[in-house]
């Protein structure tokens, strides 16, 4: 276990993906935003738990956020999902509302207070889901252009075969949405799950090529993944706290 | 499985059998009265007509109500929740009705978001892309009147202003009536700027109600062959 690290410099402020986050001054945010993306059963939660413990032991304050339901639209969203009555675009906008509600009410305050924010999924999961449902990438990019650019994004990339195996082992059933049953890929849930996860993974990789986030092989064991994540996050924190490079003139 | 394009960025350029008519204007401009009278007239003529109102989708309403009541909306979420409401109505009702050959009447359309959310600081290009999936109406009536007249109608008749309606979230003023004045003034500037951009048909909202309605009906008759929309027209 390494010694407690006292940050010597403060990370510079944040920026957004091209559109100002209305009413928020991102230049004063001193925390670090680290995002884990990936399908359910890719092991995100386990990795997040281990990272939290590790970072706190190193002396960093950690705030965790996820795409759990916000106070604002959570109830309506759950209700809509039960009935599956909303069009894909309406769902897409509902999720975007939910995301921004969390961004402005949870993530921004934590970053302002200098926390390391560990985000259990972020805009790329939302985009990948919508892309599989036929959304236009340009429209989605504009929709999420007010989101804060994370300091690091890690995609936990597992094969659909592994995902289905883990899901069945853990829950003994498949989730309607995680199986993409709303799209009509197959009437067979198992079959639909595998097909859907193949598509989600293809979209994640397409986004990965464009946004250059890190990929972690999530077919590996828990410890191997954690080791890889810690190594990469140490570099991110070094960059953020110790080597804030002077801006070129 | 085909590549189902369910969320295109822009509407297909195809001509739809229906026609889309929207009314826009400040609170107090009388546009809701005018579109109600228009609705009555078209129904009376036997036309296939459908009416849709801003912020009225049942499923989204609850979230909007909660957000407004608890004052928990930011400019971004305020804008997005209205876009969600619109998308729900647009994809489940407005667009299918247009494909089914209806005259679709909208009390407020995306321009309301452009005007109000623009005042709240959302960038015009962001807002236009957000609503990029929606068709521009065939006719948009803009009920224009001097700011003081609109304010007078609202502030006289309904003393209880609502928080977001008055733009209180913008910190223009601690006084709710003053905040409403400033907010409405800015909204009006945005409407005026959109007049040419979207080719609004301007109606002088200071004129007597029947006169405005006549203007509206005349314009529709010039632009649309109403005989095509009569229920009994098909054989």
Image: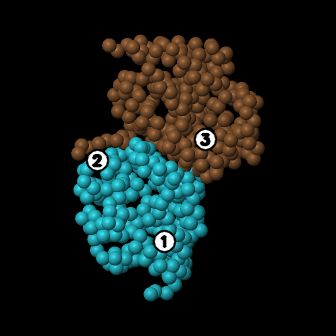
Chain colours: A cyan, B brown
| Side of A26 where B46 appears, left or right | left
Image quadrant where one finds the N terminus of chain A: bottom left
Residue B67 locus on image (x, y percent): 59, 49
Q: Residues within 10 Å of mark 3 (few under 14, many from 20)?
A: many
Residue, x 42% and y 47% (percent of image)?
A83
Q: Residue at x 34, y 69 (%)?
A: A170
3 or 1: mark nearer the eye = 3
Report x, y in % for residue B88: 45, 40
Please tell me how crowded label 2 is: few (under 14), some (14-19), or many (20+) other residues with Cα within 10 Å: few
Residue B145 appears in the figure: yes
What SS does tag 1 mark?
Answer: helix
Q: Nearer the viewer, residue A129 or A80?
A: A80
Mark 2–mark 3 distance (CA, rounded to whole Å)? 42 Å
Disc number placed over residue B119 in the picture, else none: 3
Instruction: Name the residue carrying label 2.
Output: A184
Disc 1 target residue: A240
Number of numbered markers: 3
A124 and A150: which one is in front?
A124
Q: Is residue B196 visible?
A: no
Q: Chain of mark 1?
A: A
Tell me: residue B117, above or below residue B157: below
Numbered mark located on residue B233 in the image: none
Which image quadrant for residue A45? bottom left
Q: Is residue A51 above or below residue A198?
A: below
Residue A7 in the image: state x and y as whole percent. 54, 78
Q: What's the CA distance linking mark 3 and mark 1?
A: 36 Å
Where disc 3 sits, the SS reads: helix
């Amino acid at each position: 276990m390494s010694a407690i690290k006292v940050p010597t410099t403060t990370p510079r402020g944040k920026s957004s993906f091209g559109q100002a986050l209305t009413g928020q001054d991102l230049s004063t945010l001193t925390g670090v935003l680290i995002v884990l993306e990936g399908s359910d059963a890719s092991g995100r939660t386990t990795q997040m738990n281990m990272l939290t413990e590790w970072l706190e032991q190193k002396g960093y304050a950690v705030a965790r956020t996820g795409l759990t339901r916000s106070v604002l639209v959570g109830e309506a969203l759950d209700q809509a999902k039960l009935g599956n009555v909303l069009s894909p675009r309406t769902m897409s906008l509902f999720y975007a509302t939910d995301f921004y509600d969390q961004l402005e009410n949870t993530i921004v305050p934590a970053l302002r207070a200098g926390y390391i924010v560990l985000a259990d999924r972020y805009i790329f999961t939302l985009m990948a889901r919508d892309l599989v449902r036929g959304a236009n990438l340009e429209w989605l990019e504009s929709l999420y252009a007010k989101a804060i650019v994370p300091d690091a994004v890690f995609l936990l990339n597992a094969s659909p075969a592994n995902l289905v195996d883990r899901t069945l082992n853990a829950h003994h059933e498949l989730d309607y949405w995680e199986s993409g049953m709303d799209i009509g890929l197959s009437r067979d849930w198992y079959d639909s799950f595998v097909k859907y996860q193949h598509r989600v993974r293809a979209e994640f990789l397409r986004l990965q090529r464009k946004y250059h986030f890190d990929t972690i092989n999530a077919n590996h064991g828990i410890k191997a993944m954690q080791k890889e994540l810690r190594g990469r996050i140490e570099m991110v924190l070094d960059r953020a706290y110790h080597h804030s490079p002077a801006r070129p003139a | 499985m085909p590549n189902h394009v369910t969320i295109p960025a822009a509407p297909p350029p195809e001509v739809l059998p229906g026609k889309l008519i929207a009314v826009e204007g400040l609170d107090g401009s009388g546009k809701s009265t005018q579109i109600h009278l228009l609705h009555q007239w078209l129904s009376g003529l036997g036309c296939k007509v459908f009416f849709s109102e801003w912020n009225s989708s049942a499923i989204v309403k609850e979230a909007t109500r909660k957000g407004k009541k608890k004052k928990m909306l930011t400019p971004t979420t305020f804008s997005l929740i209205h876009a969600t409401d619109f998308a729900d109505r647009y994809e489940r009702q407005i667009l299918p009705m247009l494909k089914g050959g209806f005259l679709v009447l909208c009390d407020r359309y995306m321009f309301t978001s452009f005007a109000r959310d623009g005042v709240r600081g959302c960038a015009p290009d962001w807002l236009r892309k957000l609503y990029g999936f929606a068709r521009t109406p065939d006719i948009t009536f803009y009920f224009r009147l001097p700011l003081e007249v609109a304010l007078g109608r609202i502030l006289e008749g309904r003393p209880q202003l609502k928080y977001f309606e008055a733009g209180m979230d913008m910190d223009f003023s601690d006084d709710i009536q003053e905040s409403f004045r400033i907010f409405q003034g800015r909204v009006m500037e945005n409407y005026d700027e959109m007049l040419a951009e979207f080719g609004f048909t301007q109606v002088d909202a200071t004129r007597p109600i029947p006169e405005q309605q006549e203007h509206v009906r005349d314009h529709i008759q010039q632009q649309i062959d109403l005989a095509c929309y009569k229920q009994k027209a098909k054989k």
